[in-house]
Amino acid sequence: MKLMVLIFFICLIIPMMIYLLSLFLYMREMENRHKLVSFECGFDSFLNARVPFSMRFFLLAVIFIVFDIEIVLLFPIPMLMNLNNMNLIIITLVFFLLLFGLLHEWNEGAIDWMK
């Protein structure tokens, strides 16, 4: 039993040591800044590679994706024609929760493109 535990720990420690050694050896190469600079057809780039991104657009896109997925999940509901009262109440509550979320985002100004 002790031999099995010893073999297990040896098999665990050897890959960890190899990983740490490779990490240490490649750390020196990562410090080279020339590898991180953008390069265009043999010339240094003329413009900044980073383009400023509108946070308003990002927020609007995230809100759109969330509400779009929620609406798509509501599509199969009309196919369930044999709804009992409890299911109908739950579906109505989910719909009003979505409507409340939309009104809240509208009230907070997150949906307005420009203020």
Image (tube, rainbow, N blue to C red):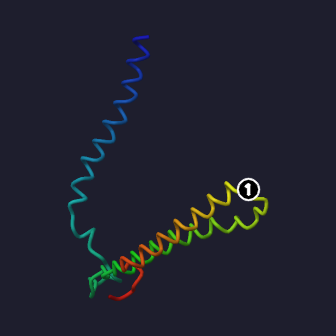
Q: Considering depth in this image, is 102 or 13 the residue closer to the camera?
A: 102
Q: Amino acid at mark 1?
A: Asn
Q: Where is the N terminus found, in terms of image quarters? A: top left
Residue drawn at the location 27% of the way across and 68% of the way down? 35
Q: Quadrant of residue 29?
A: bottom left
Q: Considering depth in this image, is 37 or 94 the residue closer to the camera?
A: 94
Q: Quadrant of residue 79?
A: bottom right
Q: Of all residues shown, which one is farthest toward the right?
A: 82
Picture coordinates of residue 108, whole percent (x, y):
36, 76
According to the picture, the residue beneath numbered tag 1 turns out to be: 84
Residue drawn at the location 46% of the way across and 69% of the way down? 101
Q: Considering depth in this image, is 72 or 52 the residue closer to the camera?
A: 72
> Relative to 100, is 10 above or below?
above
Q: How many marks?
A: 1
> Relative to 23, is 34 above or below?
below
Residue drawn at the location 64% of the way across and 66% of the way down? 74
Number of residues whose C-alpha sits closer than 10 Å to that of mark 1, classed few (under 14), some (14–19) or many (20 or more): few
Q: Quadrant of residue 115?
A: bottom left
Q: Considering depth in this image, is 104 or 6 the residue closer to the camera?
A: 104
Picture coordinates of residue 19, whole percent (x, y):
33, 42
Picture coordinates of residue 104, whole percent (x, y):
42, 73
In this rendering, position of residue 77 left or right of residue 37: right
> Relative to 50, is 11 above or below?
above
Give the secondary structure at mark 1.
Answer: loop
Residue drawn at the location 63% of the way across and 59% of the way down? 89
Q: Of all residues shown, which one is farthest toward the front?
A: 85
> Relative to 80, is 8 above or below?
above
Picture coordinates of residue 48, whole percent (x, y):
27, 83
